[in-house]
Image (cartoon, rainbow, N blue to C red):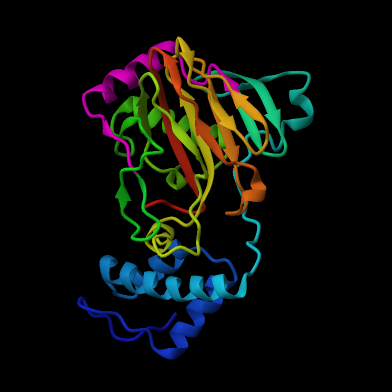
């Protein structure tokens, strides 16, 4: 890759570089890879992110106007090699935990695991998060920042990657189970839902045609899967529903719900919501998986 002379104030792609970047974006190459190359050629990270975001926005505008069908993306699949055997032996033996496969569906791609977390690990996560939670926010698809939304009434917080030995152990267990690079996972998020609180149905991927998607995609590419861990069993309510598929998953302490989406499109049937809690509280921890290393 060749580039114009780097500047800490601005970054202007010369025409050959611009055409090269557009061609690679069109071919489906991760923005994160392109960003790494720009930084390697001497551009500081903030400048490179800003310039690449501008270029991505222009490309996304072209995609929106041409109505190109989203392409398939490689996604994690914890059962890609065990699928035939799992019907007879519904367990996966990781180094630090024996996990039972409770449910496995192809479309939408949903897998429910029992005993992913031990009761003690669940309790520890709740206690670590309890003093740091605040009102939950969603991604603003116009600006790329976050904002409050009436459809999400929970409270939550985010850990740093590998913030404690417990957090790192869980992150690495997820990576091993899903056979997905550890660095492609976002930081764990913990949410608390009290009575009547919910998260109305939504998709976890971002719409690549919206202005706010570009800074998000520049730091790890698209989300391709969700791993949701239930930290307690609510007294009543609080399941996870997939309204387009007619499926609801009950919340059970220690269990985990995995689902993937190979394109940012409603045909994945992964629109889902956190059902209102009718009695007690619900605590969950989530990790989203990206196409490439998450910054």
- Is residue 290 placed above or below 123 in the rendered structure? below
* Residue extending furthest toward the bottom: 15
Front one among 164 and 287: 287
Front one among 45 and 51: 51
- Is residue 191 placed above or below 146 in the rendered structure? above
Residue 286 belongs to the span the image colors magenta: no
Q: Quadrant of residue 136?
A: top left
- Is residue 139 placed above or below 194 in the rendered structure? below
Front one among 234 and 78: 234
Q: Quadrant of residue 119?
A: top left
Tell me: 160 left or right of 264. Answer: left
Q: Position of residue 40 (x, y in %)?
A: 35, 70
Residue plotted at (29% across, 29% down): 164
The span shown in magenta is 113-137
Q: Position of residue 276 (x, y in %)?
A: 46, 24
Residue plotted at (61% across, 75% down): 66
Quadrant of the rendering where the N terminus is positioned: bottom left
Q: Position of residue 97 (x, y in %)?
A: 52, 19
Residue plotted at (71% across, 39% down): 107
Q: Position of residue 176 (x, y in %)?
A: 53, 34
- Is residue 209 placed above or below 251 in the rendered structure? below
Residue plotted at (26% across, 66% down): 46
Q: Quadrant of residue 101?
A: top right
Tell me: 74 left or right of 274. Answer: right
Front one among 147 and 46: 147
How many marks on residues?
0
Residue 134 belongs to the span the image colors magenta: yes
């Amino acid at each position: 890759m060749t580039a114009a002379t780097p500047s800490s104030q601005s970054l202007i792609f010369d025409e050959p570089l611009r055409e090269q970047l557009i061609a690679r974006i069109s071919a489906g190459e991760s923005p994160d890879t392109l960003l790494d190359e720009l930084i390697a050629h001497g551009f500081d990270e903030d400048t490179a992110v800003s310039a690449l975001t501008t270029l991505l926005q222009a490309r996304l505008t072209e995609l929106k106007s041409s109505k190109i069908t989203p392409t398939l993306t490689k996604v994690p699949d914890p059962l890609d090699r065990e699928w035939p055997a799992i019907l007879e032996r519904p367990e996966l033996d990781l180094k630090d935990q024996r996990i039972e496969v409770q449910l496995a569906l192809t479309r939408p791609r949903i897998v429910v695991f029992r005993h992913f977390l031990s009761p003690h690990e669940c309790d520890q996560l709740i206690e670590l998060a309890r003093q740091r939670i605040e009102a939950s926010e969603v991604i603003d698809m116009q600006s790329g920042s976050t904002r409050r939304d009436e459809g999400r009434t929970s409270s939550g917080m985010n850990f740093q990657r590998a913030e404690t030995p417990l957090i790192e152990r869980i992150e690495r267990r997820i990576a091993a189970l899903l056979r997905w690079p550890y660095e492609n996972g976002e930081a764990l998020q913990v949410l608390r839902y009290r009575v009547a609180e919910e998260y109305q149905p939504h998709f976890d991927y971002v719409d690549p045609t919206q202005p706010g998607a570009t800074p998000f995609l520049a730091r790890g590419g698209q989300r391709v899967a969700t791993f949701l861990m239930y930290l307690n069993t609510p007294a009543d309510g609080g399941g996870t529903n997939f309204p387009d598929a007619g499926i609801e998953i009950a919340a059970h302490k220690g269990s985990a719900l995995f689902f993937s989406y190979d394109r940012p499109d409603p045909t994945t049937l992964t629109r889902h919501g956190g059902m209102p809690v009718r009695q007690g509280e619900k605590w969950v921890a989530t990790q989203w998986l990206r196409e490439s290393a998450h910054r």
